[in-house]
Amino acid sequence: MENRSADQGDVSRTPDESCEAARVVVVGSINMDLVIRAAAIPGPGQTIAGHNFSTMPGGKGANQAVAAARCGGRVSMIGRVGNDDFGQRLLLGLKANGVDTEGVMFSEGVSTGVATIVVNDIGENAICVAGGANLLLSVDDIDEQLDLIKQADVILIQLEIPQQTAVHVIHEAHSRNIPVILNPAPVGQEINPDIFKADVLIPNQDETTRLCGEPAHDIHSAKMAGSALVARGAQAVVVTLGRRGAVAITADHIFQVPPFNAKIVDTTGAGDAFCGAFAVAYAQQMKARKQKNTLEVPEEVLRYAARFAGAAGALACNKFGAQPSMPRLHAIQRLIQRSC
Ligand code: RIB
């Protein structure tokens, strides 16, 4: 096996090479994305003409579940949809991507989550989400799905579900020594401090700024802000910085994750690709090191998973849409090899 520099991680091992696929349980949102491409993102009071409109599967939870499945994870999703056409279509899409949907429940009298998204000509977006059924995912629902949770090598959550439910997931996972990765997106007005008990936090620069109250728009400030988040309880924080790559922070280490070149078509879902890929790489490496069922976050595993995830995030920018742009394992491997 060839040795690589520490900054690049051991890219010669990839998530599919362990004998058994990592089991990832994603607890999170499932949305239908209503997407308009336009020259610009309209400001308040503006009406502009768009280029075209599409409905596409989305939701941070579902996107991350598809990302994890496409890069080799054995993935189960826990969430809620409305008993409507969007909900049915989204479940079919998850299944078609190999995601187990036994843990997805239907809510009567409420719509499936919907996101309206405008993507401009340089691939930036503005998103507004009506949470619908996602907001009904309760602590009791989690208790009903404990059999799924128990089987996980890693659990991946975001904040498009009630925070109380996310905190309960962390509690139940930790009582079984199962690590939890939290993508704290979106960051709302009030933050339950118990979310910082997640083992690995993966915020983007804007979320980091909101969580810390200090700007985190470049590598230096992201390192400072990440350290502040580690001080609140997370063992590791990976701040994603778009074109600048990412920085990872633990109590003992701070390192940069170099960016991959990306052709930017649409950045929607790039963070979700990062998180889904990170979860699989992280769990697979822990299994390979026989460090399953421990809440420790080894530095080499963090380096490896962050680099793998960075490649997935870059590839997700190449295509239009959130779920449709989630890259497959071979594409991630190819990009990493080309960049060595
Ligand atoms: O992260 C992108 C996602 O955010 C979109 O798919 C949309 O549904 C919102 O949840």
Image (spheres, rainbow, N blue to C red):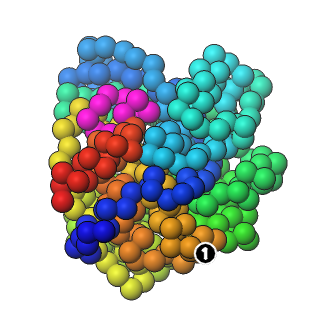
Percent from the top left, x then y, of residue 79? 66, 40
Percent from the top left, x then y, of residue 94? 57, 31
Percent from the top left, x then y, of residue 290? 56, 73
Compared across the picture, whether 335 is left or right of 72 comes to left
Q: Is residue 192 above or below residue 16?
A: below
Q: Residue at x 24, y 29 (%)?
A: 120
Asked whether residue 317 is in view, the answer is yes
Q: Quadrant of the N terminus?
A: bottom left
Percent from the top left, x then y, of residue 275? 44, 52
Q: Residue at x 56, y 74 (%)?
A: 291
Magenta segment: 316-325
Q: Quadrant of the C terminus?
A: bottom left
- Residue 137: which quarter of the image? top right
> Judging from the image, what secondary structure is the residue with disc 1 in?
loop
Which residue is nearer to you in this view: 135 or 278?
278
Q: Residue at x 68, y 64 (%)?
A: 173
Residue labelled with disc 1:
294
What amino acid does circle 1 point to?
Thr
**Dot 1, how many residues are within 10 Å of its Cα: few (below 14), some (14-19), or many (20+)?**
some
Q: Residue at x 61, y 61 (%)?
A: 153
Task: Name the dominant secondary structure of the magenta segment.
Answer: loop
